[in-house]
Image (spheres, rainbow, N blue to C red):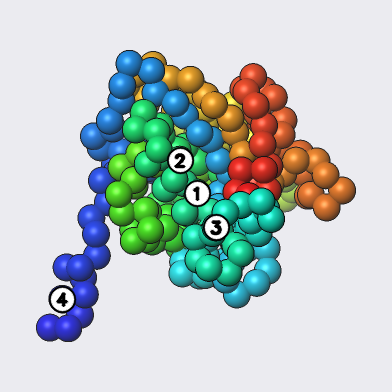
Amino acid sequence: MQQAKELRMTPQLPHKTVVLPHMIKYLPKFPNTGELSRIYGFDLDHTLIKPKLGGKFGRSADDWMFMSYALRSDEGGDQDGTGYCKSADILVKILSLDTKAHVVVFSNQGGVITVPKESKSCIKYMKKIEMILQDPTLAEVRDRIWLYASPKRPASLSNKKPKHGKATKATRRVSEPKPVVDSAFPFELMRKPNVGMYEEFKKDFPGKFELVYYCGDAAGRATDFSDSDKMFAHNLGTVFRTPEEVFK
């Protein structure tokens, strides 16, 4: 009985979930759009969240926490009384102050495979995203948060040619050639800094909008692993901002 009670208390997500070989999408079912909506783009890992157990990648669906950023000394206050502000609090602030605003998350997920959809990595990732969206901090604004993720190309859809060698009983059998299905799933186009995920968002969003900026941690700095977020913003023709600029 206790378990059933806890399940009933879990908020139902106002999102439609789409899982494709080359993309995972969380789309608000009833997006509130005005004449011209303002879009704030963000990366996910090490921009909005990080593993709470340390390391670069989360070990389980619940191994995550919202990022905390030190406030500038000229700030009059903070959200948690420690001189730090959580990324989730800033998202809420953006969406609360601007009723025409939407937050869109674009994330490369090279450790996730969606073929089949029941793969361990896919199930773990989707459970994590649902936990993030269900966080009480986002209760009043979660219906204006969109998420797009680019998973890894599965081996079953690769273009690798079979190695030539001694024929076996199985390979001697005459069979119909398999169709090349890889070209139907534009994996590389979806990965940042390519703009495939953004193009998908443009198709999904039911109104006109302007992209205010894109924020991510891969800025090409000496300590960064890549400049993919900075180049993604460049390819979108929008302003690029680092997390330290947005969350301080």
Q: Which mark is residue 94?
A: 2
- Asked whether residue 150 appears in the rendered view, the answer is no
Q: Quadrant of residue 96?
A: top left
Q: Earlier in the sequence, mark 4 or mark 3?
A: 4
Cα–Cα span, label 2 and label 3? 17 Å
Q: Which mark is residue 5?
A: 4
Quadrant of the image containing the N terminus = bottom left
Question: Residue at the location (34% across, 47% down)?
Answer: 142
CB within 8 Å, label 1 to label 2: yes
- For disc 1, the marked residue is 90
Q: Earlier in the sequence, mark 2 or mark 4?
A: 4
Question: What secondary structure is marked by label 3?
Answer: loop
Numbered disc in front, either 3 or 1: 3
Numbered disc in front, either 4 or 3: 3
Cα–Cα span, label 1 and label 2? 6 Å
- The single residue placed furthest to the right in the displayed view is 222
Q: Earlier in the sequence, mark 2 or mark 3?
A: 3
